[in-house]
Image (cartoon, helix red, strand yellow):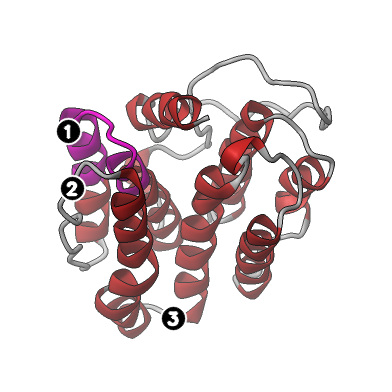
């Protein structure tokens, strides 16, 4: 499972963060059916140059989360740094400074704990206050939504246990609450929620998270 998680993280790290075509309609959820491998390719009618501050917040938070989680899983430094620099540059456009990723020890448990501390504690102390001061609470909730929904990639299917495990439900509730607070429509989270609660395969859940971020990106457009 660890190798599978890392493979999908690497695909997402390497994928573009936007394209100029519309997002295709997502297929209906298929419980317990693995989705065909494909890269994350968020679609939006806007190009990166025309993203507003809410869209930029979503993208940099999602990309930063992927970089931190892949870093903790032993992904190649080049791929991790490329994703981190992308997140750092977008955050810089918002006037934010990102703390560096924690050093990697080589021990999976230690590095996983460090990644969670970085995402949930360090960023809360060093990034969230600056984001709130520069913009508003909606931006903070968008940040929380993108970050916590990305964590689902780490906790879903741990040790091969698919479905609504307690930790998974906690993550679901966390990002769904943030999405509501950010005034995102409930439908954005429905596909992933249904897949998780039905015990769908890891790949199906992973790809549904990509689509969830695509829908949110479109919804936040002007």
> Which residue in the structure is indicated by mark 3?
136
Rounded to the nearest whole Å, what is the CA distance between mark 3 and mark 1?
A: 34 Å
> Which residue in the structure is indicated by mark 1?
77
> Which residue in the structure is indicated by mark 2?
105
**Magenta segment range?**
68-86
Q: Is residue 134 magenta?
A: no
Q: Position of residue 26 (x, y in %)?
A: 73, 30
**What kind of element bears circle 3?**
loop
Task: Using a 10 Å C-alpha cutoff, classify the residue at mark 1 as few (fewer than 14 neighbours), some (14 to 19) or many (20 or more).
Answer: few
**What kind of element bears circle 1?**
helix
Earlier residue among tags 3 and 2: 2
Residue placed at 58% from the left, 43% from the top? 158
Task: Using a 10 Å C-alpha cutoff, classify the residue at mark 2 as few (fewer than 14 neighbours), some (14 to 19) or many (20 or more).
Answer: few
**What kind of element bears circle 2?**
loop
Residue placed at 64% from the left, 14% from the top? 36
Task: Using a 10 Å C-alpha cutoff, classify the residue at mark 3 as few (fewer than 14 neighbours), some (14 to 19) or many (20 or more).
Answer: few
Q: Position of residue 65 (x, y in %)?
A: 38, 51
Earlier residue among tags 3 and 1: 1
């Amino acid at each position: 499972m660890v190798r599978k998680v890392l493979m999908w993280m690497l695909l997402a790290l390497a994928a573009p963060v936007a394209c100029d075509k519309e997002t295709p309609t997502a297929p209906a959820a298929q419980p317990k059916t693995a989705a065909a491998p494909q890269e994350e390719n968020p679609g939006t009618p806007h190009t990166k140059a025309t993203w507003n501050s809410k869209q930029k917040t979503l993208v940099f938070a999602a990309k930063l989360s992927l970089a931190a989680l892949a870093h903790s899983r032993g992904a190649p430094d080049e791929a991790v740094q490329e994703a981190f620099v992308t997140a750092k540059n977008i955050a810089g456009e918002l006037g934010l400074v990102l703390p560096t990723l924690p050093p990697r020890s080589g021990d999976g448990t230690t590095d996983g704990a460090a990644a969670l501390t970085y995402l949930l504690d360090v960023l809360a102390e060093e990034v969230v206050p600056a984001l709130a001061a520069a913009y508003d609470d909606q931006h903070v909730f968008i940040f929380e939504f993108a970050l916590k929904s990305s964590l689902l990639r780490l906790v879903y299917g741990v040790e091969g246990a698919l479905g609504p495990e307690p930790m998974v439900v906690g993550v679901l509730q966390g990002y769904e609450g943030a999405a509501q607070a950010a005034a995102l429509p409930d439908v954005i989270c429905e596909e992933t929620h249904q897949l998780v609660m039905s015990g769908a395969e890891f790949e199906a859940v992973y790809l549904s998270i990509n689509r969830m971020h695509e829908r949110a990106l479109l919804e936040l457009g002007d």
